[in-house]
Image (cartoon, rainbow, N blue to C red):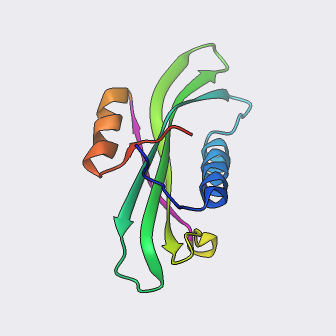
Amino acid sequence: MDLVNGLNDKGLKEILKKIDDYSKSENKNSSSSSYTLEPQGTYLGIFSSSDSAYENIIGLSIIYKVTETKSDGLKDTQYKDYSYAAGVKKDDSVDMDKLEKLQFNTTTDLEGLKSYLSNYKLKEYKQ
C-alpha cells in the first residue's frame, strides 16, 4: 500500500519524531512510577483539504503499549495512540508550522484501538 506516493519523506520522519517526543513527555518517570513505551504500529491517513493552500491533510498516529510500574511493584498496562495532523503543500512538503496534536485515546483493548483508527480511515503504515 503506497499511501504516501510523492509525499516528502522528511516531513513524515519529522512528524514521527514529534509523536515519539510527545508520547515520552506524557509518560515521564517519577519517584512513584516508571514507564516503558513499546510502539505497536504506525497509522497514516491522507484526506482532502478544503484549504486551498494544501493539496491534502495528513494524519499520523503511533499506538504505544504503555506499562506503568509503580514504586510498590504493581504494573498497569494500557494502549495509547498519539497523533498529529498537518497540511500537505502543493510541492508535497508537510507544513510543520501548523502541525496539530490530535486527541489521544487510552484503552486496554489493542484491537479496539486499531479498529478505532481504521474507522477514521487511518491505515497501518510500514516505514
Q: Residue at x 44, y 75 (%)?
A: 55
Measured from the top left, where is residue 42 in percent x and y?
A: 49, 40
- Most extreme residue toward the right is 31
Residue 22 part of the magenta-drawn span: no
Q: Quadrant of residue 48?
A: bottom left
Q: Measured along the vertical axis of the image, is residue 98 above or below residue 32?
A: below
For the record, the magenta segment spans 99-107
Secondary structure, magenta segment, majority class: strand
* Closer to us: 48 or 26: 48
Q: Is residue 105 magenta?
A: yes
Q: Residue at x 63, y 61 (%)?
A: 11
Which quarter of the rendering shows the C terminus? top right
Name the image quarter holding the N terminus: top left
Residue at coordinates 43% horizontally, 68% vertically from top-left? 57
Choose between 66 and 58: the one closer to the eye.
58
- On the question of residue 109 being in view, the answer is no
Outermost residue to the top: 73
User: In the displayed structure, would residue 69 be above or below residue 115?
Assistant: above
Give x and y (percent) for residue 106: 41, 39
Q: Is residue 20 visible?
A: yes
Residue 13 sits above or below residue 99 on the image? above
Front-most of 21 and 126? 126
Residue for point 30% across, 51% down: 121
